[in-house]
Image (spheres, grey):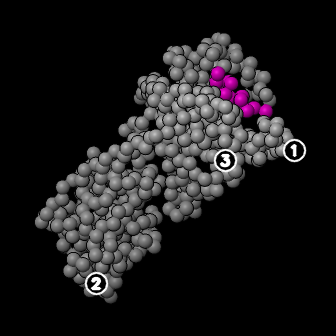
Amino acid sequence: MVARAYTVAFEGVEARLVEVQCATSPGMPAFSIVGLPDKAVSEARDRVRSALSALSIALPSKKITVNLSPADLPKIGSHFDLPIALALLAALDVIPHDKLAETVALGELSLDGTLVPVLGALPAAMAAATENKSLFCPSACGPEAAWVEATAVFAPKTLAETLRHFTGQAELSPAEPGEIAPHQGGRDFRDVKGQEKAKRALEIAATGRHHVLMVGSPGSGKSMLAARLSSILPPLSPTEALETSMIHSLAGLISEGGIQRARPFREPHHTASMAAIVGGGRGAKPGEISLAHNGVLFMDEFPEYPRTVLETLRQPVETGEVVVARANAHVRYPCRFMLIAAANPCKCGYLADAARACARVPVCGEEYMSRISGPLLDRFDLRIEVPPVAFSDLDLPQSGETSATISTRVAKGRAIQTARFEGTEMRVNADLEGSALEEIATPDTEGKDLLLRVADRFGLSARGYHRVLRVARTIADLDGSEGVRKPHVAEAVGYRLALSKEL
């Protein structure tokens, strides 16, 4: 008789149900695992044998075959240990077959039977809820998986506890959700002296989730501004928190089961590889753009990134998702992030400073900024210059608005968008397209005339034209205006053309 247990295999953030079939048959004693397992899964037979031995359960002198179905789906990871052990115990008539049919299990076994934490407990719980099954996972993963209220989550510490539960000797209690991770604050926009235009641009970007390019000499405050952007962003909604946490679960970034409500802020180094930024590597893991989903991706020294890495951002920035296609994997990850890029105006950084500029002006700046291709530059909604702050201004007392004040305006703007897009797949103004963009963001007559003149004078692309409309709609939301008027369009155009070569 074939015993069956259930687990999951991960394809991106999707957890696909896998049936673990175990059969014993007469023949030379052997323990084989089939069904496209990787090295970690193949080694499960030794961990399972040792864990059962720790429970004084000896394997029979028969041929043991474990099949992971569907057999053409790659099985990667050590979380197959527990379901393989459960299927084997059912094949040996140690635990009832019918109980395994109602559960999904995942977990790595140590040699003494202790359950070791694994990645992906949260998406596994989502898959179990979809199949109307309960979930068994290591105790350290229980608080994370328990956030899915639609399924019962049991988190034993050892294989022995799992065995006693299935045999009715000592049933486990469902796991409780972990604590919400506290927001790590401390950085305030009030610390930034001057740079009022840059602060205004970041406020607009935070409200509508627009992409921003900041260009300025070294020490002008670009990184300082970006680091404080998180302090004005609204917390993640429950849906967004679950989406983001599922990706972070696969990457092993959820600590002690705590779901994070603060928006992620990722800042990779400019030496990061394409796989690190976009995703890939062994098992096609999520990259920085997916880890920044519903949050901020800050790329400092933007032109210093490899050209191939920068060009791979063009499609994810536009579509909000990335497909990691490899020879042995083809997975899709969401990546609706806000890209904040910072760059020096030239290689030496002092192109605009007459006293310090190099002798290669303006060639130095043109060559350096040309590392950012035109199609990629076209995808930035707001482009701003960040001039250096005078030394005399650094001694002035703090006088700017606090992050709390700015975040209040951002929250009001986001609330308007939430009500506007209720019942649709769109969430913020950056998602506007097609007929919805024409209906919601079309300016009044004066504003439209201004935009048409600008588009004709400076040769705006169709993408640039639409992005100006989206930014103008966000500015109107911050202004509390139902319609988009000429002042809103004028401000949006100013940010669009700030770094244009035509000016």
x 86%, y 44%: residue: 360
* Residue underneath mark 2: 62
Q: Earlier in the sequence, mark 1 or mark 2?
A: 2
Left-right relation of 379 to 60: right
Q: Earlier in the sequence, mark 1 or mark 3?
A: 3
Q: In x, y percent, where is residue 207?
A: 52, 29
Span highlighted in magenta in the image: 491-501
What is the spatial separation of the Cα atoms under label 1 and label 2, in whole angstroms?
81 Å
Foreground disc of the pair 1, 3:
1
Q: Is residue 485 magenta?
A: no
What is the spatial separation of the Cα atoms under label 1 and label 3, in whole angstroms?
22 Å
x 66%, y 38%: residue: 220
Q: Amino acid at mark 3?
A: Glu
Q: Secondary structure at mark 2?
A: loop
* Residue underneath mark 1: 359
The 10 Å Cα crowd at callout 1, few under 14, some 14 to 19, many 20 or more, is: few
